[in-house]
Image (tube, rainbow, N blue to C red):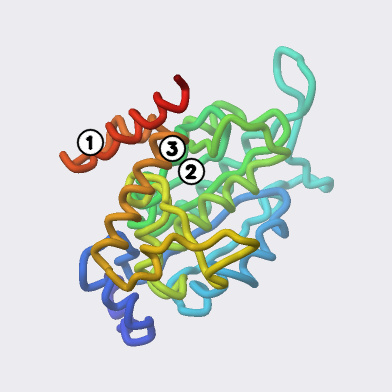
Amino acid sequence: MVPNAPDLTGAFPRDARSCLASGRVCYTVYIMNIKAISIFPLLYEPFTHVGVMKMAIDKGVLDFEAVDLRDYTHDRHHTTDDIPFGGGAGMMFLPRPLIEALETIDNPAGSWLKIGVAPQGDRLTQSMVEDLAHEERLLFVAGRYEGIDERVMERLDLTISIGDVVLSGGEIAAIEIIDAITRLLPGATGNAASTGEESFSSGLLEYPQYTRPGELDGEAVPDVLVSGHHANIARWRREEALRRTLIRRPDLLRDFDLTEQDRKYLSLVLADLRGIID
């Protein structure tokens, strides 16, 4: 807790206060500070005016700033890039402006968790997002062109990749990570409980969802969902999440703590699938 910080708990919705009190995965410190260094800081601006980032900023639980890397250049052209040693196509960021930006913001050293966004980083997971949501200060560095000088990369605390895909710049990937973190902050979503029920939060893909009308072009909502029987609904959702995960992302089941009932159900699903194949 920040010394002499005002108690903002009452400003949060009831479900957010419940999240704070319960110890569930949610933001638990006074305020999340996030900065993102970029040569195109305006790419971040639209996301601060809509959705979860705006709500979190309005609630006072997120302080976000997009930092212009050109503010840390000292030539009249505000140069931020140069050709790579050894030749090759493209340009890459000069190390000196980035180092100056990092040292200026992360002062005293170690007060910010410095995060690079690059294809060679660790693959982003929901558990990683949950860990980051408990930090107090996050500083993102979004690369462009051919990347960032390795001497700068070595000064970062970690590097994250959103997947095996090539983007024009790291800002889009950084926004994805920031959005995922912000959703865990109390008050950033309309229903704090919903963030714990979605794909990957439980370790499984999310079960199918339906809303009105109850019948659409001859396709009806599963009867169990309109039965009013909460235990049966919970069991159906669990089984559908298991089925979907087995079919679409079986790799997730390797590290998932399956109950005996889960295993029996998955055996039935596998038997059905074999019957279809045979």
Residue 110 in sight from this viewpoint:
no
Across and down, in percent, residue 2 comes to 30, 71
The quadrant of the image that shows the C terminus is top left
Circle 2 sits on which residue? 115
Under mark 1, the amino acid is Arg
Q: Is residue 179 visible?
A: yes
Q: Quadrant of residue 264?
A: top left
Residue named by callout 1: 263
The residue that appears at 29% across and 78% down in the rendered structure is 17
Of badges 1 and 3, the one in the foreground is 1
Asked which secondary structure carries label 3, the reply is strand
Q: Which mark, residue 158?
A: 3
Residue 160 lies, in percent from the top left, at 49, 38
The residue type indicated by label 2 comes to Ile
Q: Is residue 100 above or below residue 55?
A: above
Q: Amino acid at mark 3?
A: Leu
The location of residue 3, given as percent across then percent down, is: 28, 74
21 w.r.t. 255: above or below: below
**Comes first in the chain, label 2 or label 3:** 2
Up-down relation of residue 120 to residue 113 (above or below): above
Q: Nearer the viewer, mark 2 or mark 1?
A: 1
**Marks 2 and 1, Cα distance to the nearest angstrom?**
39 Å
The residue shown at (48%, 43%) is 115
Q: Is residue 207 above or below residue 28?
A: above
Whether pointer 2 and pointer 3 mark residues with C-beta atoms closer than 8 Å, the reply is yes
Q: Quadrant of residue 236?
A: bottom left
Marks 2 and 3, how far apart at CA: 5 Å
Q: Position of 232 compared to 275: left or right?
A: left
- First reached walking from the N terminus: tag 2 or tag 1: 2
Q: Residue at x 56, y 67 (%)?
A: 215
